[in-house]
Image (cartoon, grey):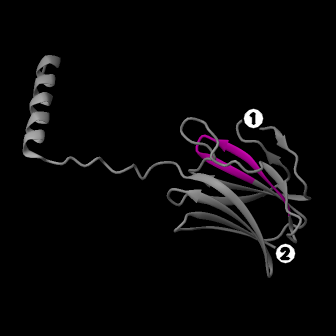
Amino acid sequence: MTTRFRRAVTAVAASVLMLTGAVVAAAPASSTQTPTMTGIRTGLHSGFDRIVLDMSGHRPGVSARWGDELRQDGSGSVVWLTGEHFVTVRVNPAAAHDDRGRSIYLGAKKFRTRDLRNVMAVALVGDFEAVLSIGLGTRKKTWVRTFTLGSPTRVVIDVGH
């Protein structure tokens, strides 16, 4: 099929749609869009500290792992953070920036959590290749529970006292 023929068919189809008054609906936005982090909140609860990542989009996967230190995703550089023990929480797929590389999350990349019992500090340690990594510095190595909630989408990280 030649380009000239394709253009002619497209023009005829557009004319028919205009003459009949047909309405063409746009396709809905893709549900595969990477969820983005818009905020981080912390809270003290009976028996545990809670960190909540506010997200836009669908629920991502989440996992947590204890380690001897925190490493920046991509470069592998050590991230210095207050604490004796460290948890890396990976949220996948997720990002803190939009498709053009502009930051969506405008809060602190690293901050102390003076009102919590075990979690001493929180840091954004990675926003690389659709994986968002959050580092936690803690006083004690205890249990960690991660899960997601919807309406609105949130990632929840609970760390025992």
Task: Give 11 or 109, whichever is nearer the viewer.
Answer: 11
Instruction: Locate the C terminus by quadrant.
Output: bottom right
Assign a secondary structure to mark 2: loop
Most common secondary structure along the magenta stretch: strand
Q: Amino acid at mark 2?
A: His
The residue at 61%/47% (across/down) is: 95
Q: Nearer the viewer, residue 104 or 94?
A: 104
Q: Earlier in the sequence, mark 2 or mark 1?
A: 1
Q: Amino acid at mark 1?
A: Ser
Inter-mark Cα distance, 2 to 1: 32 Å
**Against 52, is 67 above or below?**
above
Q: Residue 146 sits in which quadrant?
A: bottom right
Residue 112, given in percent of the width and then of the height, sits at: 86, 58
In the visual, does 114 lie left or right of 31? right
Residue 22 pos. (x, y %): 13, 47
Labels 2 and 1 touching (C-beta < 8 A): no
Check residue 121 in the rendering and tell me which mark sits there, or answer none: none
Q: Residue at x 56, y 63 (%)?
A: 153
Q: Residues within 10 Å of mark 1 (few under 14, many from 20)?
A: few
Report which residue position mark 1 lands on: 75
Q: Callout 2: few (<14), some (14-19), or many (20+) C-alpha neighbours within 10 Å? A: many
Check disc 1 and report its element: helix, strand or loop: loop
Quadrant assignment, res 117: bottom right
Please tell me which residue is depicted at 64% across the width and 42% down the height of the picture.
Answer: 103
Report the magenta residues as a range. 120-134
List x then y, in percent, for residue 156: 66, 67
Image coords of residue 150 (percent x, y): 53, 68
- In the displayed structure, 143 sits above or below 25; it is below
Residue indicated by mark 2: 161
Query: Could you say which is closer to the camera, residue 74 or residue 5?
Result: 5
Depicted 40 relative to depicted 96: above or below: below
Which residue is found at the position 17% from the left and 18% from the top? 3
